[in-house]
Structure formats: C-alpha cells, structure tokens
Amino acid sequence: MKHFEANFDGLVGPTHNYAGLSFGNVASFSNAAQTSNPKAAAKQGLQKAKSLADLGMVQGVLAPQERPDLYTLRRIGFSGSDAEVLQKAAQQAPALLNACCSASSMWTANAATVSPSADTRDGKVHFTPANLVDKLHRSIEPVTTGNILQATFNNDRHFKHHQHLPEHASFGDEGAANHTRLCAEYGHAGVELFVYGQSATNPDAPKPKKYPARHTLEASQAVARLHQLEDESCVFMQQNPDVIDQGVFHNDVISVGNQNVLFYHEQAFLHTEAKFDEIRRKMDSDMHFIKVATSQVSIDDAVKSYLFNTQIITLPSGEMAIIAPTNCQENPAVFAYLNELITLGTPIKQVRYFDVKQSMQNGGGPACLRLRVAMNQQEVAAVNQNTLMNDSLFTRLNTWVDRHYRDQLTVQDLADPQLIIESRTALDELTQILKLGSVYQFQK
Ligand SMILES: NCCC[C@H](NC(=O)CCC(=O)O)C(=O)O
C-alpha cells in the first residue's frame, strides 16, 4: 500500500492581526500594533498549500476558529449584547479583548500532535489537540481544534481523537511544533522525537531564564502514552534553554525533520550526541543529521529568517525539497547556506521559496502553518475529502476570502461589532464548503 505525508494547512482567519501577544516570540513582539492584511495573509497561505498540491503532495486545509471569542469574554464577566461585550472589553481590558481576537489557530503545527498508524499499538492515527496553556490567546483554542480535527478526520476505524491534556503549566503542550517523526518510509514504524523546553517535576533541571519554556517533558510523555507508542520508538530530547532565551520559542524554529533527515542548528538541543545515538539505535535505517554551525548561520539569523521553520518534503520523485519563506532569500547568510545545502549530497536537492510574510510577522513560518499527518492510502480515503486541496477548492476558497476578508485590520478594529458578523458569516459558509457540520459554538 502507498503511504504519504499529508500537510494540513491552517486557513488564516478573518481577524488576523498583530497584537504582540506572544512573549518570547520575537516577531510577534516586534510587529505589535502594525496594521495587518487578513485577505493577503489568507491568500498567501492558500497559495503555498495549492503549490504543494501541484507538486503532487497530499494537501489539506484546517478551518480557522471563531474570533472574536465572545464566549470567553462573557465567561470573564463582560455582559450585554455582542456589541456591548466588545465595547466594554475594549475600554476596560484591551489586552483581554486582543487575546480573544487572535487568528493564531492558523498555526496548525500547534494544533495537535499526530502519531501515524505505523507507530501506534492499535494501528490507528492518533490526535491530541495541544492545550497551549502558556499563552492566554492560544489556550482558548483546543476544544474547537478538537471539533475541527474530528470533522476533518471523521472515521473511527482509522482515526483516534484524544482530549487535550490537563490545562496546567505542568502539562504545557505546544503540539507538533515540538514533535518530529523520523522514519525510513512514511509507512514504516518510525521514531517519534519529542522536544521539550523544561521538566515540570524536576526543579533542578535546566530551564530558560528570560523567556518561558512552553512545553514540558511531562506533556510529551503523556502524549506518547495516549498514542500507544512503544518506549523503543520514542526519544525525548530537551531544547537548549539558552536558545529559548534568544527567541526560539518552539523547536520548529531551530530544527526540522523528514523521514531519515534531521536538519538542525548546532545549538538546538542539550546532550545532542547522546540523544542522536539513541535515535540511531532506535531507527531501523541510516539517519542524515544535517548540522548548521553558528559560524554558518547565527541564532539571530535563524530566528529572523526562519531557516528551520521550513518544510522538508519528499516529492513523488523521492527527492526532498525545502519549502522556505522568502525571508530566507533576503538574509545573505541564510541564502548562501541554502544555496550550498543543495550541493552537499544530502537527500535535500531543491529549495522553493514562498511569500508568507503576513504570517512571519507574527512569528509563524511555512512549517508553523501546517500539521503533518502521515497516512496510508486507505486512511487518506477516510479523510473528509472536501478538505483536500485541488483546483476547485483553491478557486472556491480564494473567492470566499475575497468576499469576506478585509484588506486591513488594526488592533483598534477588533472592537468593531461588524467584525463578529463578518467572521461568523464567513465561517458558516466555510463549514458548508468543507462539509464540516457544526464545529463552532455559534452554530450549536
Ligand atoms: N508556530 C508559530 C506560532 C506563532 C504564534 N504567534 C502568535 O500567537 C502571535 C499573535 C500576536 O502577536 O498577535 C505563537 O507564538 O504561538
């Protein structure tokens, strides 16, 4: 049977904006209060997704979330009509209003952790939505994320959906941004590499001093248990706390894997050599560890360009390609490195650049925008087919964006009661296009 690694890209929601909500994420902070362009952002994302489908990849889309989140605003005491709730929140607690308006669900690398059926004891594909507890604006995502995942992977025979982990810092879980699956072939049992920022139950373990470590070892271990993974197919590795303090808030800002390739910065991890030995021992095939030295690309350049937030994909020809943001072309050290990389005799043979600047300005690159789901042919057939990218879906979604999205949005606009009407109208229509059923609270 054929096997694929599908990418499910998050559609950028109608409230895409720059509110500076993510302490520790340099781009989020430095672009705070800029005017965003939700229409351009959504179209940049669609273009990347369509281009991957055109390359012969299995490509899907995941619906965005309903924002402004009036349910959370009411839960914390703002009352009255929808317009009154927005107005009171804007006056009394603008930071809370901003948190309830973020389109951050577009970064579906953080939607969940996914383990393919080749790795799990029950032979199903397992999904655990990430609780994202470290950031208020993201901590309100997991319930709806679960609804959307269940409507997209809606077949009990093949897909197993878990509840998100307990909402406590001990179980800080940022999903697949800190999870990479290494394997010889997508359909073979692989090694699931879980990268965490700190251990919650070991106060003496290293941790960053300036910025938060969002993800714990305990969360990764819980996901491995839920997903019925064998100890022999898991490796838990700690991120270097020093790089978290330099803006590497997720592991996918400093390393990315695909099949038997791990592309990483030399400062990415703690105990790198011992852990790589463990990976080698647990893999049933040779690994290519592609190290980028600080002398080639500094941490600062890696964070600014998102060199490691690239997607490494295996094309139908068997060659690997890197899907990079155009920001990598604009950074001389990174561009020079990438030009050299494709000549080094590694499995990576091409680089393709995409403009995803609207997302990058919030600290999310190409890899943040996608959730990887390795599946066999039968599993791909069991996915909600209306979510899979093709010419007709691409045209429909572009028309849908043109009809419903604004081409500029400021943080002040978030209190505009018209935005909630526009957003709900758009999402209601989207659930019909993707045939998701009622996944949003306003539809229930
Ligand atoms: N994987 C990339 C995630 C980026 C995301 N940025 C944000 O939420 C920025 C939102 C803002 O600043 O408006 C985050 O940090 O979790």
Image: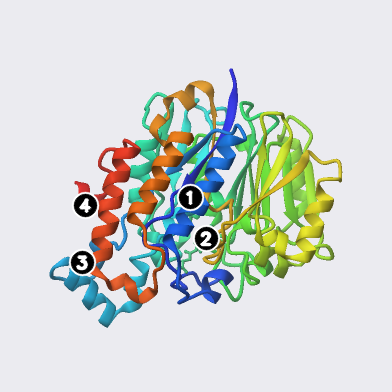
| Mark pair 3, 1: CA separation | 26 Å
The numbered mark at residue 359 is 2
Q: Amino acid at mark 4?
A: Phe
Q: What residue sits right under mark 4 in the picture?
A: 442
What SS does tag 4 mark?
helix
Residue 29 or 288: which is nearer the viewer? 29
Read off the residue under disc 1.
108
The reply to whether discs 4 and 2 touch (Cβ–Cβ < 8 Å) is: no
Tell which of 339 and 227 is nearer to you: 339
| Image location of residue 88, percent across then percent down | 22, 77
| Local crowd size for mark 1, using a 10 Å CA cut-off: few (<14), some (14–19), many (≥20) | many
Residue type at numbered disc 3: Arg
Cβ–Cβ below 8 Å for labels 3 and 4? no
Q: CA distance from mark 1 to mark 2?
A: 12 Å
Q: Residue at x 38, y 51 (%)?
A: 401
In the rendered structure, the answer to whether residue 231 lies left or right of residue 276 reads: left
Near-viewer residue (311 or 257): 311
Which numbered disc, 3 or 1, marks the residue closer to the eye? 1
Which residue lies at the image location 33% right of the left edge and 66% below the top edge? 100
- Asked whether residue 384 is in view, the answer is no
Measured Cα–Cα span from mark 4 to mark 1:
22 Å
Q: Nearer the viewer, mark 3 or mark 4?
A: 4
The answer to whether mark 3 and mark 2 are in CB contact below 8 A is no
Q: Residues within 10 Å of mark 3 (few under 14, many from 20)?
A: some
* Residue 362 location (% of width, % of height): 52, 66
Q: Amino acid at mark 2?
A: Ser
**CA distance for labels 4 and 2:** 26 Å
Q: Relative to 399, is 140 above or below?
A: below
Vertical placement of residue 14 versus 352, above or below: below
